[in-house]
Image (cartoon, rainbow, N blue to C red):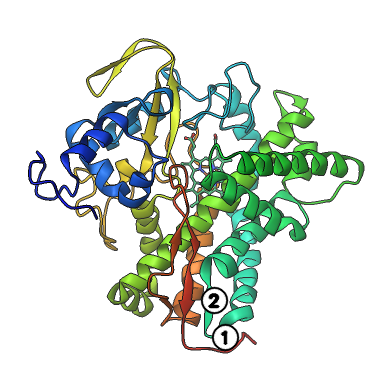
Amino acid sequence: MEQKNPGAVSSPACPFSAETQEKILHHFDHHSSLYRDHSAEALKLLRDQAPVAKTDAHGGFYVLTRYQDVLEAARDDERFCSFWGITIPTNKAPWDRAQTIPIDLDPPYNELFRDMMLPLFTPKAIDAYGVFLRQTATKLVDAFIEKGEADLARDFGSPLTALFTMELAGIDHAQADFYASTIQYGIAHPGDPDALARMAEARGRVSREVAAQKDNPRSGGLIDYLFKARVGGRPLMDWEIEAIVWLVLLGGVDSTQATISNMAVHLSDHPELKQRLIEHPDSWDDAVEEYLRLVTPQQGLSRTVTRETSLGGVELQRGDRVLMSWQAANLDESVFPNPNEIVLDRKNKRHLAFGIGKHRCMGSNIGRLEVLIALEQLLTRIPDFKVKAGEAELSADIGTVKAYKKVPITFTPGKRSA
Ligand code: HEM
């Protein structure tokens, strides 16, 4: 952490020099290394001093850091729309058709697609996914449990979520590593030409997959489901199917493995909490909820202002872009006391890790289940795991998804499952 400048006008808890504070308050950039290394402190400074702050980064946008302001923007699709892209910088021009469905669409169109997709996310469907997930998680741990060491990102969190996403989508499991590594790299290197080329290759592969399955249907899974589904009484067009599958791949292979890697690093750093969880399996669901809140894997997404309006006392114009920081909202101490701690008996579970409103995450219960199953495996099969000192490696850019790309651990070797 940088040295505090004695001349800085800062609260005792603020770790930043006056110059850095100025940078955060007026030139905030969630894709910067400053954000990567000090995100919670930067978001707190903004929330305390400029909760609807204007920054000149990436062509200019406002960053929302209070829970109430994030909630207000996310719930009001009429004033804050998604169609102009939901990332900053945007990857979509206003005249482009939706790249990912339903997330890039506004009501009522997104609701047509959302309603059509709901049967894939019922509690019964999720119970069935649980069987696949537990078997897969067990096999993955079996592959390294006798060695006494592993990389939890590479050997566990990433393959677990990627294999499940292939199963859900109806894509050959052999493609799991390609999609996971490409998408994780793309999200962690926004704007990088190599990352863009790799993402384009993966997106092209989705088009070819949909075309191939049209000729040779593969029963079960999302693609098969979408071929038979109707929106507004008509079959889906191929580009719509591709945009839905692409979104499920994006949502499926990154945010959940990010939660697992963050949770593992935190547990390793907090052995007393780990021990308490080992002794109290009844608090695992609470732990999952708290990890989603504390590390908020999907850090924030954006909306575009559709007409002159005000938010948090700040006047906004049509076309202005706002970044809704789910992470900042989840660390807002006026809503979540002791926000930087895992509080297992916290009563308020209304965190915004899955967003809120008409675009709230459709995969939230799947994400929760995946993280719970990962926690079960870690605490019951390799309970004394420890991250190798100084070897956990955060992604190059955490502005969109906060993930560790490497989590090397050691533990007492155990036995493969029967
Ligand atoms: C811990 C894991 C996850 C987190 C933190 C997460 C986070 C989010 C967030 C914040 C949104 C809201 C987007 C917005 O407001 O613009 C969202 C939407 C979405 N997520 Fe997730 N997600 C996770 C896992 C998943 C999984 C596993 C899937 C699919 C299997 C999934 C599929 C979706 C879809 C389809 C949407 C779009 C919903 C819509 O626009 O109506 N997510 N997710």
Position of residue 267 measured from the top left corner of the image (x, y, whole percent)? 36, 70
Q: Counting other residues with Cα less than 10 Å from the Cα at mark 2, is it few (<14), some (14-19), or many (20 or more)?
A: many
Coordinates of residue 304 in the picture (x, y in percent): 45, 21
Nearer to us in this view, 235 or 305: 305
**Disc sitting over residue 150 in the figure:** 2
**Left or right: residue 185 compared with residue 329:** right
Quarter of the C terminus within the rendering: bottom right
Which amino acid lies under the numbered mark 2 shown in the image of this protein? Ala
* Image point (39%, 49%), residue name: 296
- Circle 1 Cα neighbour tier, 10 Å, few/some/many (<14 / 14–19 / ≥20): some
Under circle 2, the secondary element is strand
Give the CA distance from mark 2 to mark 1. Answer: 8 Å
Q: Are marks 2 and 1 in contact (CB under 8 Å)?
A: yes
For the residue pair 318 and 105, the one nearer the viewer reads as: 318
Which circle marks residue 147 in the picture?
Answer: 1
Relative side of 241 to 195, left or right: right
198 left or right of 402?
A: right
Identify which residue, 209 or 348, lies in the foreground.
209
| x 50%, y 81%: residue | 381
Helix, strand, or loop for circle 1? loop
Q: Amino acid at mark 1?
A: Lys
